[in-house]
Amino acid sequence: MNVDLGYEWFVASLGRTLIWARLRVLEAGTAEVFDSDGKTLPYDSEDTARAALFDAEFVAFDGLDEDDALARGFSLDEVSPPRADSDAALRERMVQSLGARV
């Protein structure tokens, strides 16, 4: 049985657009990444999943401080990981436009 041990959010930025990814680590030691295309990508370990996220220029959202966020074009006060009742509904929120800067 694959028991979910929780998840962690990762974010990448492209201009004023944020792209989210959710990492889940399973009890078996494997991991899954739910990506902005609504796909769940399996990995043989948490380390492999993290490496793939870092290679794609994602950073751990919980690891960001305000200076890191501002360098990526957003403030921690204006964003938070997306939420939805299901992965199907969440998919629609995995790409977030912050609009134009004033």
Image (spheres, rainbow, N blue to C red):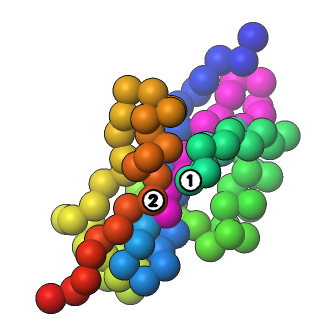
Q: Is residue 79 shown above or below 44?
A: below
Q: Which residue is mark 1?
A: 36
Mark 2, Cα crowd under 10 Å, few <14 / some 14-19 / many 20+, is: many
The answer to which quarter of the image holds residue 68 is: bottom left
* Residue 67 visible in the picture: no
Q: Secondary structure at mark 1?
A: loop
Image quadrant containing the N terminus: top right
Please say if 11 is above or below 38. below
Name the one closer to the observer, 59 or 89.
Answer: 89
**Residue sitting farthest toward the top:** 1
Marks 2 & 1, CB-CB < 8 Å contact: yes
Tally of numbered discs: 2
Q: Position of residue 80 (x, y in %)?
A: 31, 54
Q: Which mark is residue 9?
A: none
Residue 3 visible in the shown view: yes
98 horizontally vs 53: left or right: left
Dot 1 amino acid type: Ser
- Position of 49 with respect to 89 (left or right) is right
* Residue depicted at x 38% and y 62%: 96
Q: CA distance from mark 2 to mark 1?
A: 6 Å
The secondary structure that dominates the magenta segment is strand
Q: Which residues are magenta?
A: 19-31
Between 64 and 39, the one lying in front of the other is: 39
- Where is residue 48? Give x, y as percent: 79, 52
Residue type indicated by callout 2: Val
**Horizontal placement of 70 versus 89: left or right?**
left
Vertical arrangement, residue 10 with respect to residue 8, above or below: below
Tell me which residue sits at (72%, 70%) in the image. Answer: 55
As helix, strand or loop, the secondary structure at mark 2 comes to: strand
Q: Residue furthest left?
A: 102
Query: To which residue does mark 2 refer?
Result: 95
